[in-house]
C-alpha cells in the first residue's frame, strides 16, 4: 500500500480543512515546495496535491505553486482541484504531473471524461467524495443523488483505472477511516482504489493494510502528518 502525503494549497499556502469546510482552515506552511521536499526526504513514493481554490471556483488557481512543487521533487505527483478541460490535463502533464484527478467534471460531463480516459488512460484518476454514501461535487459543497458505489462501478466500466474514495465526514477530523464504506467500494470494482479521510495514527494504517488483499492500492493522509500524530517513516516502514 502506498502512502500519499497530502499537500492542500489555498492562496499559495499549505493548509488542511476540516470536513471540507472552507471556513475551518489550519495553515501549516507558506512554502509548498519545502513541504514536498520534506515528504520526499522522509521516503514518500508519491505526493497528493489539491488546489483548494480551484476546487471551490471550478478552475485551477494555484498553477505557480503546483509547478514549483513539480520542479522541486523527483517522485511522482497527482493533482486535483478545479481541473475541467483537456487543456488543463495537457498543461499539468507537461509540467511534470504524473496523474490528474477529476471530481466534479466526472459527474457533470461523463462523455468528456471518457474521451480523456481514452487519451490518457494511465494519467487520469477520479475522486469520489462521498457523504452518507452519496457523491458530492463543487469542492464538496453540493450533494448529489448519485450512489457512490454505483458511480464507482460506472467509472470502471468507462475505463477508469484509479479511483480515490474520500469520506467527507472523516476528512481532516483524525477520527479514523470509514472501513465499511471502503469495503463496499473495493468489493464493487477491480481497479486501484486509494482511501482518503480520517487517518489519525499508525493503528489506522494497520487497519487499512488489512484491505490491501481486497484491492486497496494506497491511502492519503494529511492532518495526521502535520499534527504529528502519524510518523511518515513509521507508516512507510509498515507498508
Image (cartoon, rainbow, N blue to C red):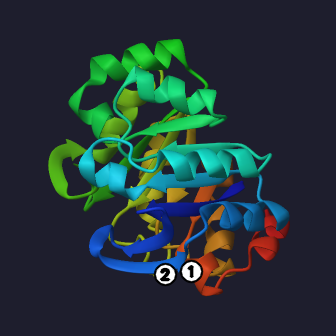
Crowding around mark 2 (Cα neighbors within 10 Å: few <14, some 14 to 19, many 20+) is: many
Quarter occupied by residue 28: bottom right
Q: How many marks?
A: 2
- The residue shown at (24%, 45%) is 147
Q: Position of residue 47 (x, y in %)?
A: 65, 53
Name the side, left or right, on which 58 lies relative to 35: left
Q: Position of residue 31 (x, y in %)?
A: 61, 68
State the mark number for residue 200.
1
Q: Is residue 118 visible?
A: yes
Q: Position of residue 120 (x, y in %)?
A: 55, 19
Q: Are marks 1 and 2 in contact (CB under 8 Å)?
A: yes
State the mark number for residue 174.
2
The span from disc 1 to disc 2 (Cα, nearest Å) is 4 Å
- The residue shown at (48%, 81%) is 174
Quarter occupied by residue 210: bottom right
Tell me if residue 54 comes above or below residue 188 in the rendering.
below
Amino acid at each position: 500500500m502506498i502512502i500519499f502525503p497530502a499537500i492542500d494549497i489555498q492562496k499559495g499556502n499549505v493548509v488542511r480543512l476540516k470536513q471540507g469546510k472552507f471556513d475551518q482552515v489550519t495553515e501549516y506552511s507558506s512554502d509548498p515546495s519545502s513541504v514536498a521536499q520534506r515528504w520526499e526526504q522522509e521516503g514518500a513514493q508519491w505526493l497528493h496535491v489539491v488546489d483548494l481554490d480551484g476546487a471551490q471556483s471550478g478552475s485551477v488557481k494555484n498553477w505557480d505553486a503546483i509547478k514549483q512543487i513539480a520542479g522541486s521533487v523527483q517522485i511522482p505527483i497527482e493533482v486535483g482541484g478545479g481541473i475541467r478541460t483537456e487543456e488543463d490535463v495537457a498543461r499539468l502533464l507537461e509540467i511534470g504531473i504524473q496523474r490528474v484527478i477529476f471530481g466534479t467534471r466526472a459527474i457533470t460531463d461523463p462523455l468528456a471524461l471518457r474521451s480523456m480516459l481514452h487519451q490518457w488512460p494511465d494519467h487520469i484518476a477520479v475522486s469520489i467524495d462521498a457523504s452518507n454514501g452519496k457523491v458530492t461535487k463543487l469542492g464538496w459543497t453540493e450533494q448529489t443523488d448519485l450512489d457512490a458505489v454505483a458511480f464507482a462501478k460506472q467509472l470502471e466500466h468507462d475505463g477508469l483505472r484509479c479511483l480515490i474514495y474520500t469520506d467527507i465526514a472523516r476528512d481532516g477530523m483524525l477520527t479514523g477511516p470509514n472501513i465499511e464504506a471502503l469495503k463496499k467500494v473495493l468489493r464493487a470494482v477491480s481497479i486501484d482504489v486509494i482511501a482518503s479521510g480520517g487517518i489519525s495514527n499508525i493503528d489506522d494504517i494497520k487497519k487499512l493494510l488489512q484491505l490491501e488483499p481486497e484491492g486497496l492500492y494506497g491511502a492519503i493522509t494529511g492532518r495526521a502528518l502535520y499534527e504529528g500524530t502519524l510518523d511518515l517513516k513509521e507508516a512507510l516502514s509498515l507498508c
